[in-house]
Amino acid sequence: MKRVIVTGAAGFFGIHATEAFLRHGCEVVAVARPGSLHNERLYSLHSPLLSVVECDMAEIGRLPALLTENGIPVDGYDTFCHLAWAGGRNDVPAQVRNIDHSLQALRSAGELHCRLFIGAGSQAEYGETGDKVITEETETKPFSAYGAAKVSACSLTRVLASQLSVEWIWCRIFSLIGRFEPCGRMLPDLVKKLKDGEAVQLSSCEQYWDYLDADDAAEALISLMEKGTSGEIYNIANGGYRPLKEYTEKAKEIFAPDTVLHYGAPPTPFVSLKPSVKKLRDDTGFVPRISFEESLGTYENRSE
C-alpha cells in the first residue's frame, strides 16, 4: 500500500485527486487550507485511509512536524503531489509566494523521504501558440504572472529535486471540468445562464480548446505515479481538441436548446489550445474515459 501526500486537497482538482488515490488503495495525507469551507469535502469522505492536515502553504515546510503533532506517521511515503496554488493570475507577489511554497513543499517531501514529487503546472506556461499542436517541447511564453510563476516553479523544483535525490515529474494541466468546478469560469457560468434563461454573450469561440474531466485527470496522476518517467514534463489533457464553439453549442443543446448564443469578437489574447497527449499515452497507457457530455451532466444539480 502506497502512502501519498496531496496539497490543495480540498480544491477543485485536489478533491478529485484525493478520491482517486483512495480508490486505488493508497493511504492519503490531505493537506488543506485552515478554515476553508471546502474542507468538508475531505471530512465527508470518511475513509480509514485518509488523514486531513490543515496547514497554510506558508507553513508547508513544517509539514513533517505537523504530521508528528497529529499522530500521523512520518515515514513510508511514496509520492508527494503538490496541487496547492493561490492568488490572482496577475498578482505578482502572490505568484512569487507560490514559487517559494512549491520549493518548501519539495523540501518537506525530501525530509519525509518521498520517492517522487509531482508538481502541478498549467497550460498557461505555453502562452499563445497560434495554430500549433502543443507538445511538451513547445516553447514556454507565458503572458500572465500565473503562467510565468508555473514555469519558474517547474524549473526550480526540477533542480532542487535533483539536489535532494527525489524523483520529479511536472504535469502541465489543461482545461479541467466536472464536479466542484468553481463559478467564475466559462463553462459553469455558461451553463448557469442557460439554465436560468439568461442571454448569453460570448467571444467568437473560434479558438480550439480541450476539456478533460477532473476525474480523468486524477487517473492520469495515478498513471504517472505508477509509470511516469522521472525528470519529465507531461501534458495532462484530453487530446480531442475542437473549436470552442462546438463545446458551447453542445452545452446549449443539453441545457437550453431554444436559446440563441451570441458570439462576438475574438478574445485578446487569442489562446488556442491543441495539446498533444502522445507522451502521456506512450509512457503510461492513459486514455480518457469520460465524455464531454458526461462531464456536463455533473452541472445538472450544482449547488455551488
Image (spheres, helix red, strand yellow):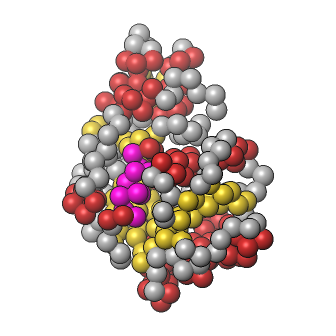
Residue 140 at x, y percent in the picture: 36, 67
The answer to whether residue 121 is left or right of residue 180 is left
Note whether 222 is above or below 188 in the view shown: below
Q: Position of residue 4 (x, y in %)?
A: 53, 64
Q: Main secondary structure of the magenta part?
A: helix
In depth, the one of 303 and 52 nearer the eye is 52
* Count of marks, rendered view: 0
Q: Is residue 232 magenta?
A: no
Residue 24 in view of the camera: yes
**Is residue 125 positioned above or below 213 on the image?**
below
**The C terminus sits in image quarter:** top right
Q: Residue furthest bottom?
A: 163
Q: Position of residue 66 (x, y in %)?
A: 74, 71
Front-most of 265 and 133?
Answer: 133
Q: Return the residue nearer the eye: 102 or 270.
A: 102
The residue drawn where x is 65% and y is 44% is: 46
At x 59% / y 37%, what residue is drawn? 183
Q: Residue at x 59, y 76 (%)?
A: 75
Q: Residue at x 68, y 57 (%)?
A: 52
Question: 183 or 4: which is nearer to us?
Answer: 4
Q: Determine which quarter of the picture holds residue 133.
A: bottom left
Residue 245 in picture, x, y percent from top left? 33, 31
Residue that extends furthest to the top in the rendered view of this protein:
258
Res. 126 in view? no
Q: Quadrant of residue 54?
A: bottom right
Segment tinted magenta in the rendering: 216-225
